[in-house]
Amino acid sequence: MSEIDLRSFIRDVPDFPKAGILFRDLTPLLEDPHALRAAVHAIADPFRGDGIDAVVGIESRGFIFGAPVALELGAGFVLIRKKGKLPAEIVQEEYELEYGTDVVEMHADAVETGQRVLLVDDLIATGGTAAAAVRLLEKAGADVAAASFLIELSALGGRRMMGVDRIHAVLEY
Ligand code: AMP
């Protein structure tokens, strides 16, 4: 496939969801078949042959990329969800929001001790969500080998929050 400019498929929406936030909207990228395929490959490519056992996606945009990345890597797919969505026994982790706290949850048996997992999400901003996901996975015994994002808002320094050595981002803003 010829090189595709993925950045041109990201729409900047000022002041969403509130004043002062520049929202990086990736729905135009999802709607284009070539851009979608190229994005999935770009998220997965650095981890081919790395012995990743499972790809972990964070609700909800992490699911869009996580499942096809898992297929690309020949790995299974594990869900990290918002509070109250998963039916079986769960483990959970709280994290700070601008105002208050939120909780992420995962099935207690979703990962095995020592399993090498790749964390996938659409975008890393402050890193709060991804860091909570890492703590949750480590609490459950997984080895978080790396994390991969489509977009990194690098000025916010989110990657330093995560405690993961190998962090890949396809597009940096
Ligand atoms: P954070 O916990 O701050 O790293 O934010 C993580 C999630 O918030 C990402 O997975 C995005 O879905 C969403 N998000 C945060 N900031 C933005 C932004 N400027 N544009 C689009 N999505 C964002």
Image (spheres, helix red, strand yellow):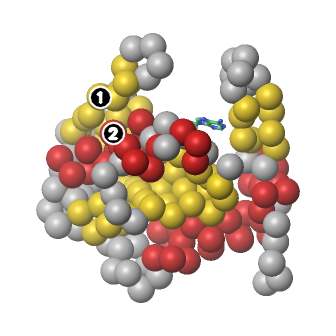
Q: Where is residue 10 in the image (x, y as percent from the top left)?
A: 78, 49
Residue at left offset 33%, top offset 39%: 132
Residue at 62% in and 71% down:
42
Image coordinates of residue 53 in percent, x first then y, are 32, 72
Secondary structure of the residue carrying tag 1 is strand
Which amino acid does the dot numbered 2 rest on? Ala
Q: Is residue 143 left or right of residue 47?
A: left
Q: Mark 2 points at which residue?
A: 132
Residue 94's disc is 1
Quadrant in the picture for the N terminus: bottom right
Residue 66, image x, y percentages: 51, 58
Classify residue 138 as left or right of residue 54: left
Examine the rendered structure and indicate whether residue 135 appears above or below residue 51: above
Instruction: Inspect this view and state whether residue 107 appears.
Output: no
- Report the number of discs: 2
Q: Distance between the residues labelled 1 and 2?
A: 7 Å
- Which of marks 2 and 1 precedes in the sequence? 1
The three-letter code of the residue at mark 1 reads Glu
Give yes or no for contact between labels 1 and 2 (Cβ–Cβ under 8 Å): yes
Location of residue 129 (image quadrant):
top left
Q: In which quarter of the image is ligand 1?
A: top right
Q: In the image, what residue occupies the spot 73% across and 63% down?
A: 36
Q: Check disc 1: other Cα within 10 Å, few if <14, some if 14-19, many if 20+.
A: some
Q: What element carries label 2?
A: helix
The residue under the point 39% across, 14% down is 100
Identify the mark at residue 63; answer none if there is no mark. Answer: none
Q: Quadrant of residue 80?
A: top left
